[in-house]
């Protein structure tokens, strides 16, 4: 294992496309992710980088069998959704950069079409394709597909959730690829920073990656996201944007209005014991107010189980938003301390020649 200087990552000569796989404990999926990425990179000329957040399983061991660059965080406590892409970006060489998760597989044919689109649309900072979700049984992923249908459809979009191909020039204008402080919304944060600079984002009607999401029961998944601070992402996003050109775009985010509404709902519920009403009337008011969101959502979704999950999920995220607003931040432009643990043979030789 060779240490990489935390403030000056060494980069050999540029290549065309860098595919960055961000992963943590993905030993079941990492080989398929890497093999599909290598095949996609071969179509356009490029490299594959695994940005590992200090996996404790065999992810790195398995990945080391392939001709890719593997980089890791020095400090495990820095592990979060925003740190992974930025870690890979620090060690990338591509004129264009594609971001994907370790439980995804790239679809051949997407990158050539995406590059043609970017060549024809110089105003576009990035382009995504269709995210093919294979886990159709999960309540979480069914609900997510319904919520996100607008920016997952072809056309100009406000973000590239699920991965996208970005111009390095646009990313450098925006300051950095992803905010190392964010536990969620890292793709939306990049999107609003780019859009604030008048760059555009598009999604083309071509399959880009396949994804099989977590099989955990939905409420267990919520608990996992609370422990991992994923639910803090909305608050961290707002905190990062305050006073910046992207603030206006961030505050338009629909989820923020929902979570703010939940916090207001809680305040109203907490105030009911102090209302100037008889005890029975206060109790009835509290019960009616507490039940109202569940009733409304059950009517909208025609399912009490889906309605209950939606409201409970909002509560987790509202509490996380409040927590994230006050979280300590590190400078987002500051390089992330990292280690290079594996190099592809040709890159190793290139470095020997370049630094001889």
Image (cartoon, rainbow, N blue to C red):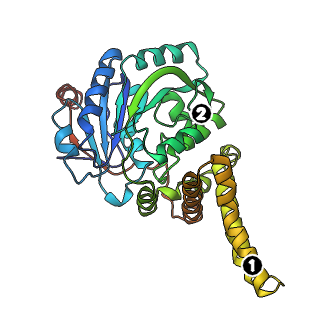
Question: Which quadrant would residue 102 be assigned to in this image?
Answer: top left
- Residue at screen point 60% across, 61% down: 318
- Residue at screen point 48% across, 57% down: 330
- Residue at screen point 51% across, 37% down: 161
Q: Residues within 10 Å of mark 1 (few under 14, many from 20)?
A: some
Between residues 282 and 125, which one lies in front from this camera angle?
282
Between residues 132 and 64, which one lies in front from this camera angle?
132
94 relative to 264 in the view: left or right: left
Instruction: Reply above or below: 216 against 68.
Output: below
Give the tally of numbered discs. Answer: 2
Among the two numbered marks 2 and 1 on one chain, the one whose residue lies closer to the N terminus: 2
Give the quarter of the figure containing the C terminus: top left
Point out which mark residue 151 bears. Answer: 2
Question: Which quadrant would residue 269 be assigned to in this image?
Answer: bottom right
Image coordinates for residue 121, horizontal then vertical, percent: 58, 16
- SS under mark 2: loop
Judge whether residue 243 can be spotted in this image. Answer: no
Instruction: Reply above or below: 268 against 194.
Output: below
Q: Pick out the residue farthest to the right.
A: 276
Image coordinates for residue 135, horizontal then vertical, percent: 40, 39
182 relative to 18 in the view: left or right: right
Image coordinates for residue 31, horizontal then vertical, percent: 23, 35
Q: Pick out the residue farthest to the bottom.
A: 279
Judge whether residue 222 can be spotted in this image. Answer: yes
- SS under mark 1: helix
Point out which mark residue 155 bears. Answer: none
Residue at which label 1 appears? 272
Image coordinates for residue 26, horizontal then vertical, percent: 28, 45
How far is the residue under mark 2 from the one under mark 1? Answer: 39 Å
């Amino acid at each position: 294992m060779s240490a990489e200087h935390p403030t000056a990552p060494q980069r050999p000569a540029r290549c065309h496309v860098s595919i960055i796989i961000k992963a943590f404990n993905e030993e079941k999926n990492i080989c398929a992710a890497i093999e599909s990425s290598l095949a996609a990179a071969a179509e356009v000329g490029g490299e594959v980088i695994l940005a590992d957040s200090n996996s404790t399983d065999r992810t790195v061991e398995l990945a080391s069998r392939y001709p890719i660059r593997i980089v890791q965080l020095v400090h495990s406590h820095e592990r979060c959704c925003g740190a992974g892409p930025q870690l890979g970006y620090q060690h990338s060489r591509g004129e264009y950069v594609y971001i994907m998760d370790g439980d995804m597989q790239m679809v051949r044919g997407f990158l050539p079409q995406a590059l043609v689109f970017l060549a024809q649309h110089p105003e576009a900072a990035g382009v995504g394709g269709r995210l093919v979700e294979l886990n159709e049984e999960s309540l979480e992923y069914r609900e997510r597909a319904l919520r996100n249908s607008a920016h997952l459809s072809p056309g100009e979009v406000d973000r590239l959730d699920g991965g996208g191909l970005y111009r390095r020039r646009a990313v450098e204008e925006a300051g950095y690829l992803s905010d190392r402080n964010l536990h969620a919304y890292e793709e939306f944060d990049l999107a609003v920073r780019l859009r604030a600079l008048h760059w555009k984002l598009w999604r083309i009607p071509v399959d880009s990656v396949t994804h099989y999401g977590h099989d955990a029961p939905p409420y267990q998944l919520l608990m996992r996201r609370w422990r991992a601070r994923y639910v803090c992402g909305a608050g961290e996003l707002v905190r990062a944007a305050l006073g910046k050109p992207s603030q206006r775009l961030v505050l338009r985010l629909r989820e923020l209005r929902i979570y703010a509404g939940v916090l207001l709902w809680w305040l109203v519920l907490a105030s009911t014991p102090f209302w100037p009403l008889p005890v029975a009337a206060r109790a009835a008011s509290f019960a009616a107010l507490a039940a109202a969101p569940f009733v409304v959502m059950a009517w909208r979704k025609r399912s009490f189980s889906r309605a209950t999950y939606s409201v409970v999920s909002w509560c987790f995220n509202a509490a996380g938003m409040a927590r994230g607003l006050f979280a300590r931040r590190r400078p987002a432009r500051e390089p992330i301390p990292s280690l290079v643990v594996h190099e592809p043979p040709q890159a190793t030789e290139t470095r020997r020649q370049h630094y001889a």
